[in-house]
Amino acid sequence: MQYYRQYVSTLVYRTNTFTGTQYKYDATILSWELLNEPHTTDNYEKNRGLQPGKMVRDWLDEMSTWLKGIDSNHLISSGEEGYRADGDTSGNYANWINGGYKGVDFVGDINLPHIDFATVHVYPDNWGIPASDFEWVRSNVIADRANIAHSAGKPIIMEESGMKTGYVGSRNSFLGDIYQWASENNYAGTLVWQVYAWNYNDGQYDFNYKMDGAQAMWNQYGYMNSK
């Protein structure tokens, strides 16, 4: 905890070399993300008879309260992927995504007073969902998490989504569907993992603006800018 607070404090109190503005007052910074994809090892709490999601939730509560105390100017997010501890566990994929397997409680986390918006990271191929069942994430993840966030009176951002080359044949099609489903559920923002401005392609999740996937990005940019 001590080292984490020291690290974050270094950022919050840093002064921008070019503008002379301390980061805690910098209006070009949208928010602070407490951690990228916080979770326990698989079934850590359940195997010990503990409440799934409590360890992460307690940490998020403590750190978000502390951070808001030193910087009340910026939003705070948890950076989580969207795993639930209390969701519907029926179906082929829902048990570990919704049943506390990852030690994250999406419902409890978004209701913390200093977590200002929800995040999800959507990777159906990495979750072991075959392309034939790709649309499962539409209602069971994208719509479900939006309903939870909006019920808490908070916005939600699709902070990451992507696919390995070849998962559903076309990255344009994949991203087009993902963004459509996010937009129809009133997501406040939609990002991708990940597109490069230069000629880079790792053959998996990364692509560039000359490749399949670029058109879906331009379409979404236009949609979001029109809102």
Image: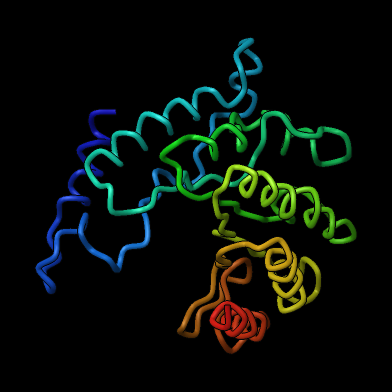
Residue 201 x, y percent position in the rendering: 56, 76
How was this image coloured?
Answer: rainbow
For the point 60% across and 53% down, which residue is it?
121
- Asked if residue 33 lies left or right of residue 87, the reply is left
Above or below residue 41? Residue 147 is: below
Above or below residue 159? Residue 174 is: below
Pick the residue in front: 177 or 43: 177
Residue 69 x, y percent position in the rendering: 25, 38
Q: Residue furthest top?
A: 49
- Asked if residue 73 lies left or right of residue 198, the reply is left
For the point 13% across and 72% down, which residue is it?
19
Quick one: quadrant of the C terminus?
bottom right
- Asked if residue 195 lies left or right of residue 68, the reply is right
Residue 194 x, y percent position in the rendering: 54, 69
Above or below residue 216? Residue 202 is: above
Above or below residue 75? Residue 20 is: below
Pick the residue in front: 97 or 155: 155
Residue 175 x, y percent position in the rendering: 70, 72
Q: Residue furthest bottom?
A: 210
For the point 87% across and 40% down, which residue is it?
92
Residue 132 in which image quadrant: bottom right
Residue 222 in which image quadrant: bottom right
For the point 88% across and 56% down, which residue is it?
133
Quick one: quadrant of the N terminus?
top left
Residue 85 in which image quadrant: top right
